Image (cartoon, grey):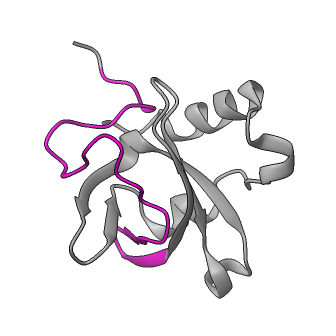
Amino acid sequence: MESSIWTYRQGIGYQPGMNLAGFEVEATDGRIGKVDKHTDEADAGRIAVDTGVWIFGKHVLLPVGTIVRVDPLDRVVYVDRNKYEIKNAPEFDRDKHDDDYGYQQQIGSYYAPWPL
């Protein structure tokens, strides 16, 4: 079975219907912000992360395939990308990109070079 960057990995602690909004997001080298918005659409799952003051209020979109663990007790989502990779991701603008397929393709291409 082929994995997609837009689908959850098996065994990471995510349960269908779980709302990740408000969870802290932990990169491989430290905290990057909080989940502002979450969707678990089939083959289009993603989290919008508010990075706060860390990178001057930028929002970034992360495909759910970058999530390696969800800790529902501590409310933390762990991703397999570092701060540099996330900081340099295309910026997310909810008004422009919420349902923009071209933007989703751009994000997928940005994260796709790294292995799942």
Which one is nearer the viewer's eye here, 3 or 96? 96
Residue 13 screen position, x and y as percent:
18, 52
Answer whether residue 38 is magenta in the image.
no
Residue 91 screen position, x and y as percent:
74, 56
Residue 53 screen position, x and y as percent:
67, 87
Side of 42 where 73 appears, left or right: left
- Image: 77 above or below 94: below
- Which residue is drawn at the image coordinates 42% and 43% (left, top)? 64
Side of 74 where 108 appears, left or right: right
**Most distant residue in the front direction:** 17
- Image: 15 above or below 8: below
Side of 52 where 5 appears, left or right: left
Using the rendered view, name the quadrant where residue 7 is placed: top left
Residue 52 screen position, x and y as percent:
65, 81
Assign the C terminus to one quadrant of the image.
Answer: top left
- Which residue is drawn at the image coordinates 21% and 12% (left, top)? 1
Count of labels shown? 0
**Most distant residue in the left direction:** 11
Which one is nearer the viewer's eye here, 62 or 14? 14
Using the rendered view, name the quadrant where residue 54 is placed: bottom right
**Most distant residue in the bottom direction:** 53
Answer whether residue 5 is magenta in the image.
yes
- Which residue is drawn at the image coordinates 68% and 64% (left, top)? 59
In the rendered structure, which segment of residues is drawn in magenta? 3-32
Which secondary structure class fits the magenta region best? loop
